[in-house]
Amino acid sequence: MFCYQCEQTAGGKGCTTFGVCGKDKETSDLQDLLVSLTEGISVYASRYYKYGKKDVDVDRFVLKALFTTVTNVNFDPKKVYEMILNGFEIREKAKKIYHDLVKEKNLKEENLPESATFVVEKDYQEVLNESQKFTFDKDIERYGEDIAGLRHLIIYGLKGTAAYADHAMILGIEDDDVYKFFHNTLNQLAEGEKDKNRLIELALKVGEINFKVMEMLDRANTSAYGNPVPTKVRVTPVKGKSILVSGHDLKDLYLLLKQTEGKGINIYTHGEMLPAHGYPELKKFKHLVGNYGSAWQNQREEFDQFKGAILMTTNCIQKPKETYKSRIFTTGLVQWPDVVHIDDEKDFTPLIKSALENEGFENDGEEKYITVGFGHNAVLGVAGKVIELVKEGKIKKFVLIGGCDGAKPGRNYYTDFATKLPKDTIILTLACGKYRFNKIDFGDIDGIPRLLDIGQCNDAYSAIKIALALSEAFNLPVNELPLSLVLSWYEQKAVCILLTLLYLGIKNIKLGPTMPAFVKPNIYQVIRENFNLVPIKSVEEDMREILNQ
């Protein structure tokens, strides 16, 4: 086992015996094999894509395989093994398309990299044994820390982009150019690309494609559920039977809301699902009553205290406590051993049955609310007023404080930073990091709330679009706007968003709590020289720098 893809990795260097996230060695090694197998699939796909050939099963498998290996998604080694077996079938399908093309076009057969050709007995233990050849530390032995780290930066960026592309695909939005990029990039990695400058270019290209994919996801969500609007969300319990929904998949929530209509069950969001309340087609369900709890890393305590059934969609699951293991369910790609999984048919009957059998909340809690739904459509709708307030000197600064939350000490920095900002500052926020301060009343500036909750990491496109709109309105480059970015990261979706920001040329970003373990000093120096990406320091020091920019 070797894994250093998340911010909390052991000792800031890498997990080698058991993952900080809860991932065991078997799961980690099998996921590394799955990534290599996916590279092998793309070796063939990249070649036949040049000639206008494609296969939807191949394309979608690549997304799902990469998404499966994102931190906090799939912890069940047997399920990863099943995906590997499916992957061999998919690779054979891609191989046949390629070989048929070779015959059709009378092309010369190529020598292909190992990931496209390796074979293994399908027995679980044999597959597990084979996985030892593909663990990520082998890249470090082969290429050295710097080049291996750059290669892994690209892979982790692709994992994050695959997650966004999968969400969009589920809602019917796909793009062949995106699939082609995945195949071409994975092929280059499979072929052993080790030129530093080429790898840096490729990482920024991941950022470019991720920007396109985030727009696709934004379009998919808003086409299906409408443009988010500012919405008050209750954050205290309502009397009655209950289901708590976490993760990012809005379609899963929508289907559950449809299936629970008239059943006397209240639906709550948790963690990443909070932005759902701002979408008109979701908020129209009266039994979507509020948000319960906070960010993903607190789920073991919060799920334990919740009085109903729980549904995990997509990622961010933690090891369930025995006290609620019988009433937590998974769906989509997220899985945990011995937790009931609801398949792609999305029949939530077992979940609903569990909710009706559990006690629910006996009484209403004290009414408390927060406001969400400040997506780009809502914010740009009041852009004229915001611009006037800037010109009048009533708004002097915009600060985006956003990103992933986590359990490692040091993340209270973001709360302190938000609360100490001057009252003429607008705070934009998104992703789980906002749970550190989103229940604080920051007041308003002439009717414009000082805290604008844009959404989750899936909604990062909105934040970027707002920044670009401000740039256009003030006729200034983004880097000359009164806008600063103070970001926290945890997993691979944060990596691809960071690559997008760098692709767009955005500089002076402050990143924490720590720098990625896979970005080694020599590579980081290049990034710093070009983009002035710097680690967070003390709140006081960073605030002085930001307010004086």
Image: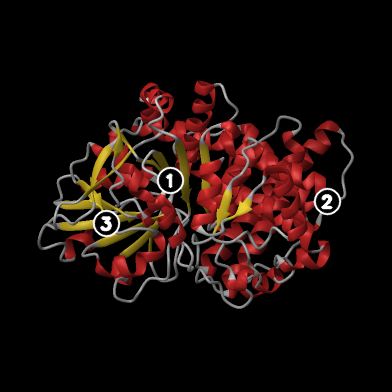
Up the image or down, 254 lies above or below 291; here it is above
Q: Percent from the top left, x then y, of residue 385?
A: 36, 23
Badge 3 element: loop
Q: Residue furthest left?
A: 363
Q: CA distance from mark 1 to mark 2?
A: 43 Å
Q: Is 63 situated left or right of 396 in this image?
A: right
* Labels 3, 2: front one: 3
- Determine contact: label 1, label 3, CB under 8 Å: no
Disc on res. 430 = 1
Amino acid type indicated by mark 1: Leu
Q: Is 293 situated left or right of 363 in this image?
A: right
The quarter of the displayed image where residue 127 is located:
bottom right
Up the image or down, 371 lies above or below 368; here it is above
- Determine contact: label 3, label 2, CB under 8 Å: no
Disc on res. 112 = 2
At x 42% / y 71%, what residue is drawn? Answer: 319
Tell me if mark 3 has few (under 14), some (14-19) or many (20+) residues whose alpha carbon lies within 10 angstroms of its own.
Answer: many
Q: Percent from the top left, x then y, of residue 394?
A: 37, 31
At x 61% / y 63%, what residue is drawn? Answer: 31
Badge 1 element: strand
The earlier-in-sequence mark between 3 and 2 is 2
Q: Note whether residue 333 is visible.
A: yes
Q: Percent from the top left, x then y, of residue 476?
A: 58, 25
Tell me if mark 1 has few (under 14), some (14-19) or many (20+) residues whose alpha carbon lies within 10 angstroms of its own.
Answer: many
The earlier-in-sequence mark between 1 and 3 is 3
Badge 2 element: loop
* Labels 1, 2: front one: 1
What residue did someone put label 3 on?
292
Tell me if mark 2 has few (under 14), some (14-19) or many (20+) residues whose alpha carbon lies within 10 angstroms of its own.
Answer: some
In front of the other: 139 or 424: 424
Q: CA distance from mark 3 to mark 2?
A: 51 Å
The quarter of the displayed image where residue 80 is located:
bottom right
